[in-house]
Image (cartoon, grey):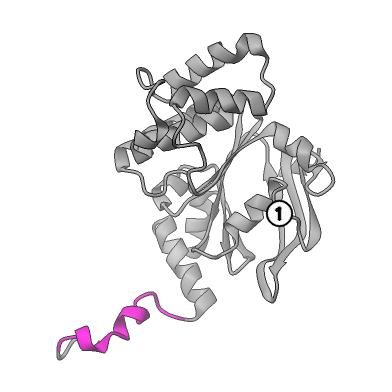
Amino acid sequence: MNEVAGQETLIQIRDLHKSFGKLEAVGGIDLDIPRGKIFGLLGPNGAGKSTLIRMLCGVLRPTSGSGTVFGYDIVKDAELIKQNIGYMSQKFSLYEDLTVYENLKFYTEIYNVNRKEVDQRIEQIVNMAGLSGRKNQITGTLSGGWKQRLALGCTLIHRPKLLILDEPTAGVDPVSRRIFWEIIYRLSRQGISILVTTHYMDEAESCDEVAFIFRGNLIGRGTPSEIISELGVKTLEDVFIKYEEEVTGNKVMSSYDELKFLLREGDEN
């Protein structure tokens, strides 16, 4: 393993590109992510975050460049990477017509969990996710927050060393978000590395380190406090907006100002 500022490197990316026809979704990213941290990938919709994550998971093949996870090559060793990670996509991907128990059982079979440990692991996941008493409930009848907890549980069933979470709390209520992140903190304290994308800057400020991606390129990286201090702003939301304005050349409010028919006389400025 290589070192990132004295820390063991978990993920190493070098000049990584991904194009879809003429569209370059990821444009030559270099990034090292240390082991044992909560690392946040931030950026607007369409910035290339999900494409980058899918390459790291071995789901998408890069157009060019290279990357390793646990020292495994993301192209040559994709199956080995998949065995060691838990991946939770933006879209809820479990079977809604199965029960909570049946979904968890299905994942134990996918990952060849020792049969002697299956029931114990499922019971522990159910308790961890706060789903006690809901084990036989049809997944499709769960609320959004419960579904996300179940999806997280399914990613943990094989004891992964790395969790990759792509906007895991999108669309869930504040209470569910808080519970979800409490679970993430506990997992991190147990030594599980976590790579997460989010649009919620309060969540991002809880990460050990963050990196900003805009239009497929890496434009900033560091601890939340370091980046806030470097740009001379007050919050990560201010950082996000400042980067957005620098990359696009437009003020955030400019799109509203174009709706002149909504502006009252004297409000143009």
**Residue occupying the point 81% across, 40% down:** 72
Residue 253 at least partly seen: yes
Q: Which residues are magenta?
A: 250-264
Residue 259 counted in the magenta span:
yes
**Residue occupying the point 48% across, 22% down:** 101
Answer left or right for 234 relative to 33: left
Residue 21 counted in the magenta span:
no
Kindly identify the amino acid type of the residue bearing the numbered disc 1.
Leu
Q: Looking at this view, is 39 or 111 the one in front?
A: 111
Instruction: State how many labels appear.
Output: 1
- Residue 79 picture quarter: top right
Residue that extends furthest to the right in the rendered view of this protein: 76
- What element does badge 1 sit on? loop
Q: Quadrant of the N terminus?
A: top right
Q: Tell me the residue that label 1 is attached to.
A: 60
Q: Quadrant of the C terminus?
A: bottom left
Residue 180 at least partly seen: no
Residue 97 image offset from top left, x and y in percent: 44, 34
